[in-house]
Amino acid sequence: MNIFVAKLSFDTRESTLQNAFEEFGAVDSVKIIMDKFTQKSKGFGFVEMPNDDEARNAIEALDDTDLDGRTIVVKESEPRERRDNRRGGGGNFNRRY
């Protein structure tokens, strides 16, 4: 299961995140998203756990808890296509009448 983790401290390292999730089971991968220009954390990341039951236990236990001085948000990651379909309209900002 792919897990989304938000509101991370900018100082949180992937190893810290991995250690927190490994308390609940095996972790396949951990990725904290970095800004491509500044190479600083964007404050969110993803954890991949192979066992869905262990992943759900980790989500339930770690959501709204403290990690590196910040209260983190932990939830199941939504597939990209499902997120994209939720976006509203918009645009038309350069339209001339």
Image (cartoon, rainbow, N blue to C red):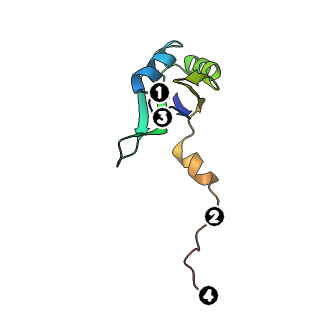
- Disc 3: which residue: 45
- Disc 2: which residue: 89
- Tell me which amino acid carries mark 2: Gly
Percent across and percent down for residue 54 are 56, 16
**Image point (40%, 21%), residue name:** 15
Image quadrant in which you'd find residue 57: top right
Is disc 3 surrounded by few (<14), some (14 to 19) or many (20+) residues within 10 Å? many
**Near-viewer residue (39 or 97):** 39
Distance (Cα) linking label 3 and label 1: 10 Å
- From the viewer's perspective, is residue 81 above or below residue 12? below
Is disc 2 surrounded by few (<14), some (14 to 19) or many (20+) residues within 10 Å? few
**Image point (50%, 13%), residue name:** 25
Percent across and percent down for residue 7 are 56, 35
Distance (Cα) linking label 4 and label 3: 43 Å
Q: Are marks 1 and 2 in contact (CB under 8 Å)?
A: no
- Tell me which amino acid carries mark 1: Glu
Percent across and percent down for residue 38 are 36, 46
SS at circle 2: loop
- Tell me which amino acid carries mark 4: Tyr
**Can you tell which mark lies on residue 39?**
none
- Disc 4: which residue: 97
Is disc 1 surrounded by few (<14), some (14 to 19) or many (20+) residues within 10 Å? many
> Going from the N terminus, do you reach mark 1 or mark 4 first?
1
Is residue 49 in view? yes
Q: Nearer the viewer, mark 4 or mark 2?
A: 4
Q: Are marks 1 and 4 in contact (CB under 8 Å)?
A: no
- From the viewer's perspective, is residue 10 above or below residue 91? above
> Going from the N terminus, do you reach mark 4 or mark 2 first?
2
Q: Nearer the viewer, mark 3 or mark 1?
A: 3
- Disc 1: which residue: 48
- Tell me which amino acid carries mark 3: Gly
